[in-house]
Image (cartoon, coloured by chain):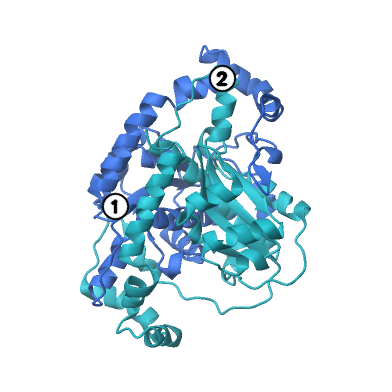
Chain colours: A blue, B cyan
Amino acid sequence: MLKDMLCRRTTIRRYRKEDVSDALIDELLDSAMRTQTMGNLQLYSVVRTRSEEMKQRLLPTHFGQPMVVDAPVVLTICADFHRTTRWCEEREAQPGYGNVLSLMNAMSDALLFTQTFSLLAEEAGLGLCYLGTTIYNPGQIIDVLGLPQLVMPVATLTVGWPDERPVISDRLPLSAIVHEETYHDYSRADIDRLYQPKEALPENREFVRVNGKQTLAQVFTDCRYRREDNEAMSETFLETMRRQGFMV
Amino acid sequence: MLKDMLCRRTTIRRYRKEDVSDALIDELLDSAMRTQTMGNLQLYSVVRTRSEEMKQRLLPTHFGQPMVVDAPVVLTICADFHRTTRWCEEREAQPGYGNVLSLMNAMSDALLFTQTFSLLAEEAGLGLCYLGTTIYNPGQIIDVLGLPQLVMPVATLTVGWPDERPVISDRLPLSAIVHEETYHDYSRADIDRLYQPKEALPENREFVRVNGKQTLAQVFTDCRYRREDNEAMSETFLETMRRQGFMV
């Protein structure tokens, strides 16, 4: 059962030296294509990286995270309106997908597909790391992989056979994310109730200490996901949307 | 096995009159929270709609699609940086998440979570319809559900016990979506090879005929996903990003 697999899953960053065959990856990708997709257009593509040279070129785009070169396979999943546009061009149809909404449609398709693939791969015993850095440096990834207009990288998975068993990470209680009928805002008491168990975990207290901060939230705002970085990367993302033809 | 379930799955738009318990939905949402998430921040929320009144209010935002009122449960999944921001505010941290990159981060978290939930629900025998219309009318959904700043609806699922068995829809061959090392562009011959099987299906030929078009691609460009609609909805989406505080 998927449920049983999920309660044990963790992100895997260390892989055995053993290869993962193209046949296995293909089988999993093929199954993942059953994911619902807008108008059955399948607005995604996958670039498979195996060569050392290409992994080395991708490495700086992911801030040097070693999984990019250590994993036998790296998959870059892209929102893709290019293929559909090429189809339209060859069929006397006038495509109109160079806009923000179409990018959002294709991103949705690509991310839903990515997650189905991830769960299939984990069910098959593979270990994955999802690299959120993909949308921090989309322009560089576009250059390395040769992505044409109307293609935007949205997710990267490093894939291999697990060589570690990390502890299962904590989650907020379900009541933190579910709202009945309308959104209820969070009072100070709600925030305390929902976040105090996470803040009290020894690993999180240590995380605050080594970063020299007073609160766990400050580790996020001051070290991990800082306003100035987010704003600079937002500019980069908007520029890349223009470059790829998604802003009219 | 997830793989066996996937090869049979279809979108379900007709539901039996039987209820789906909150306990079951909660159990599935709780499992879905095991999905990887940026910095373990869980940048998503779910608004659960059960009341007739709220379903009626959501109905026009989804262009009157009857599943919205026919399904026992409607879930609107939102990219949510509001809760994390509230946490930061209560913990002497200065949040900086009112920008495009942060919206993309939260959208990614929300869509990966949505897909895990979908597969869990389908494995439990439920039927789902994913409403892509959520991002066509985000402003109206925000009004109906009372979503605060830094919350954006990104996906809606109508959920119930299946009362139909639709035929399994076709997919492109895997070679249409996979690229080795770099993106290979599509020649005319590639497009023919990849799309002709789809175009030859009796249901798609009928789809072209009833729409009075020459090609299947024209049904998409002229009827289903038109440039003028996409451009108008792109403006709406950008305005809603500003309204929700995601554009500086």
SS type, badge 2: helix
Question: Of the residues shown, which amino acid type is indicated by label 2?
Answer: Phe
Give me the disc on residue A92: none
For the question of whether residue A169 can be seen, the reply is yes
Horizontal and vertical percent position of residue B52: 70, 60
- Along the line of sight, the residue nearer the viewer: B62 or B122: B62
- Residue name at image x 71 percent, y 63 percent: B72
Other-residue count near label 1 (Cα within 10 Å), few / some / many at <14 / 14–19 / ≥20: many
Other-residue count near label 2 (Cα within 10 Å), few / some / many at <14 / 14–19 / ≥20: some
Q: Which residue position holds label 2?
A: A207
Q: Do labels 1 and 2 share a chain?
A: yes
Callout 2: chain:
A
Label 1 to label 2: alpha-carbon separation:
39 Å
- Residue name at image x 36 percent, y 53 percent: B234
Image quadrant where one finds the N terminus of chain A? bottom right
Q: Quadrant of residue B82?
A: top right
Left or right placement of residue A79 versus residue B157 in this view: left
Task: Select label 1 or label 2 by which is in front.
Answer: 1
Callout 1: chain:
A
Q: Quadrant of residue A61?
A: top left
- Residue name at image x 37 percent, y 24 percent: A228
Left or right placement of residue A2 versus residue A151 in this view: right
Query: Compared with residue B227, is residue B199 higher up or lower down, i.e. above or below?
Result: below
Q: Which residue position holds label 1?
A: A246
Query: Compared with residue B170, is residue B139 higher up or lower down, i.e. above or below?
Result: above
For the question of whether residue A71 can be seen, the reply is no
Left or right placement of residue A228 versus residue A168 in this view: left
SS type, badge 1: loop
